[in-house]
């Protein structure tokens, strides 16, 4: 291994399917070591994971980085957004975490939206109309369905701040991830007391929200930890906020992320507040904003379709009349929590490859329709309209994904060579803390967004119109509670 030119830092991405850890040279951005460990997510009615498994996966992923992990002078943990982690007085999970893609809290969401005075009120105060993904709706679900678990909770955390607290022994979260709870006001930058009251959430159960650039603490003397005690720990943030840091994103530059979730977002200097609920008005991990739309059915739904068809995920075929809305897990964008997948337009001549392509088209269609709204938040976005879409997440490695985004967006697409942008963003945050630099500037210095640009192709208006018409025509069917 070539000797690093600067101090080392570690960045962790604890996302839905796995934990990924990187050790990075702060001088150059070179990844000197990496590790990964899988998570288990329940299937069936809900989506849950054991926070203890995340903790073990974090230690395992860092251990896989070898001796470099112990040399890291600072560390930061980014995590999947929204998940409800309930802890007892000893810091042990009361029950498994309810994840962002668990839609069981849809009825509680309806009630909460109504009780505060409707969608516009929520958007004005918190920047978002909460989806069933948001922590506030999950807490309401827990109180309704498992009141004993709610009563036993001495602390409520998000995935990233649960892990950060395990490292430091101190409760802390950041404004980016706090903005996805539904009980943190983007208007005032504090927890919203009326919403906490409405949701029955005692404020003392929540962690303080640190300001960007503040340290969460230092690594404790922990059994089995590959990190050196005393290592600086940054606040961490939600995974999408971390990816924005990792790309060194400037306002208006659009990102399409294809992971377990699909997300489209851009940094904005304006606080978003979309009363339609399509755009979540998140804070970013610096002092700006991150208007974002998220779909529940992205790479996992397409991989499932490929498996049903017994095809490799790249075995797509063009043409035909088939259309698919791959809303296998219910959907968040558009807001159809009770939906199931819909396949239509199948003819004798339809091939398996065309059905698979239709699944990609349906997944990308939902994201791109929301992107227009995301970019409306900030006038600077108009100036960036001709810039390539940045394509990231596990799906960005796939040719079928990339070509579908190109064909349905009609825009150039840039795929950064750096693969783990969430972990890299966490590393940039750790480096920023260590060196007293803006983490966005750190990532730009590391040139993380660099990668091949795929020129625009003509937008496939016919496919988009077909999907628009199927979505409109199937509204009642997709909204039906089975
Ligand atoms: N070579 C590839 N081509 C296309 N898709 C891929 C490839 N490798 C991984 N993926 C997809 O990436 C997804 C995981 O993406 P990732 O961003 O790591 O998810 P998360 O961060 O939500 O855990 C998998 O569901 C898989 O479908
Ligand atoms: O709910 C959202 C964003 O609001 C998701 O984007 C989660 O943050 C999960 O992320 P991945 O595991 O798919 O990266």
Image: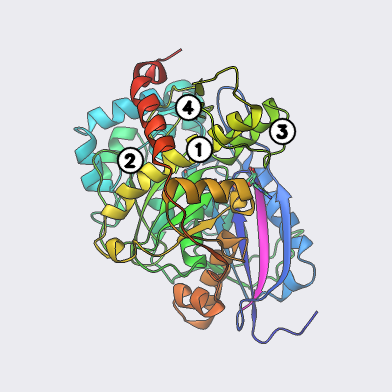
Q: Dot 1: what SS?
A: helix
Q: Which residue is mark 3?
A: 311
For label 1, the residue is: 361
Q: CA distance from mark 1 to mark 4?
A: 17 Å
Q: Nearer the viewer, residue 61 or 333?
A: 333
Alpha carbons under labels 3 and 2: distance apart: 33 Å
Position of residue 473 relative to residue 10, above or below, is above
Q: Nearer the viewer, mark 1 or mark 2?
A: 1
Please state the horizontal and vertical placement of residue 314, each as a whole percent of the image: 67, 42
User: Along the polypeptide, which appears first: circle 3 or circle 2?
Assistant: 2
What color scheme is it?
rainbow
The x, y position of residue 201, in whole percent, is 37, 38
Residue nearest the observer in this picture, 443 or 8:
443
Mark 4, other Cα within 10 Å: few <14 / some 14–19 / many ≥20:
many
**In the image: residue 474, left or right of residue 86:** left
Q: Which residues are magenta?
A: 18-25
Quadrant position of residue 392: bottom right
Q: Residue at the spot x=26%, y=57% of the render?
A: 271
Left or right: where 42 falls relative to 294: right
Nearer mark to the viewer, of 3 and 2: 3
The Cα atoms of the two marked residues, 1 and 3, are separated by 17 Å
Residue found at the far top of this picture: 482
* Residue 330: numbered disc: 4
Q: Quadrant of residue 382?
A: bottom left
x 49%, y 61%: residue: 455
Q: Is residue 42 visible?
A: no
What secondary structure is marked by label 3? loop
Question: On the image, numbered disc 2 is attached to which residue?
Answer: 278
Residue 19 lies in the magenta-colored region: yes
Q: Earlier in the sequence, mark 1 or mark 3?
A: 3
């Amino acid at each position: 291994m070539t000797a690093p030119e600067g101090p080392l830092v570690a960045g962790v991405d604890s996302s839905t399917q796995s934990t990924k850890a990187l050790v990075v040279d702060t001088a150059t951005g070179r990844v000197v070591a990496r590790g990964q460990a899988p998570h288990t997510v329940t299937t069936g009615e809900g989506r849950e994971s054991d926070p203890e498994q995340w903790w073990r996966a974090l230690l395992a992923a860092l251990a896989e980085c070898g001796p470099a992990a112990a040399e890291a002078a600072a560390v930061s943990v980014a995590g999947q957004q929204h998940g409800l982690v309930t802890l007892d007085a000893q810091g042990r999970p009361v029950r498994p975490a309810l994840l962002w893609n668990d839609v069981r809290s849809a009825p509680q969401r309806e009630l909460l939206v109504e009780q505060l005075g409707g969608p516009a009120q929520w958007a004005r105060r918190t920047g978002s109309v909460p989806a069933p993904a948001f922590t506030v709706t999950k807490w309401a679900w827990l109180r309704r369905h498992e009141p004993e678990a709610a009563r036993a909770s001495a602390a409520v955390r998000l995935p990233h701040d649960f892990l950060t607290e395990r490292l430091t022994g101190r409760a802390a979260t950041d404004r980016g991830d706090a903005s996805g709870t539904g009980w943190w006001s983007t208007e005032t930058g504090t927890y919203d007391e009326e919403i906490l009251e409405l949701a029955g959430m005692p404020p003392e159960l929540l962690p303080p929200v640190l300001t960007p650039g503040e340290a969460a603490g230092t690594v404790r003397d922990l059994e089995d930890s590959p990190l050196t005690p005393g290592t600086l720990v940054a606040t961490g943030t939600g995974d999408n906020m971390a990816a924005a840091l990792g790309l060194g994103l400037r306002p208006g530059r659009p990102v399409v992320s294809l992971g377990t979730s699909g997300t489209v977002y851009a940094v904005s200097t304006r606080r978003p507040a979309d009363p339609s609920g399509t755009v979540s008005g998140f804070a970013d991990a610096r002092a700006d904003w991150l208007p974002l739309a998220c779909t529940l059915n992205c790479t996992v739904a397409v991989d499932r379709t490929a498996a049903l068809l017994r095809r490799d995920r790249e075995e797509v075929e063009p043409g035909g009349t088939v259309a698919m809305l791959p809303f296998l897990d219910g959907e968040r964008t558009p807001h159809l929590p009770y939906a199931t997948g819909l396949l239509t337009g199948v003819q004798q001549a339809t091939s398996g490859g065309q059905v698979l392509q239709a699944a990609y088209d349906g997944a990308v269609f939902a994201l791109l329709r929301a992107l227009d709204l995301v970019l409306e938040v900030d006038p600077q976005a108009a100036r960036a309209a001709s810039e390539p879409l940045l394509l990231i997440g596990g799906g960005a490695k796939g040719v079928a994904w990339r070509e579908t985004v190109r064909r349905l967006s009609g825009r150039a697409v840039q795929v950064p060579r750096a693969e783990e942008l969430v972990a890299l963003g966490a590393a940039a945050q750790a480096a920023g803390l260590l060196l007293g630099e803006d983490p966005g500037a750190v990532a730009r210095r590391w040139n993380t967004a660099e990668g091949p640009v795929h020129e625009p192709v003509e937008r496939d208006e016919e496919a988009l119109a077909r999907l628009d018409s199927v979505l409109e025509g199937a509204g009642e069917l997709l909204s039906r509670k089975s």
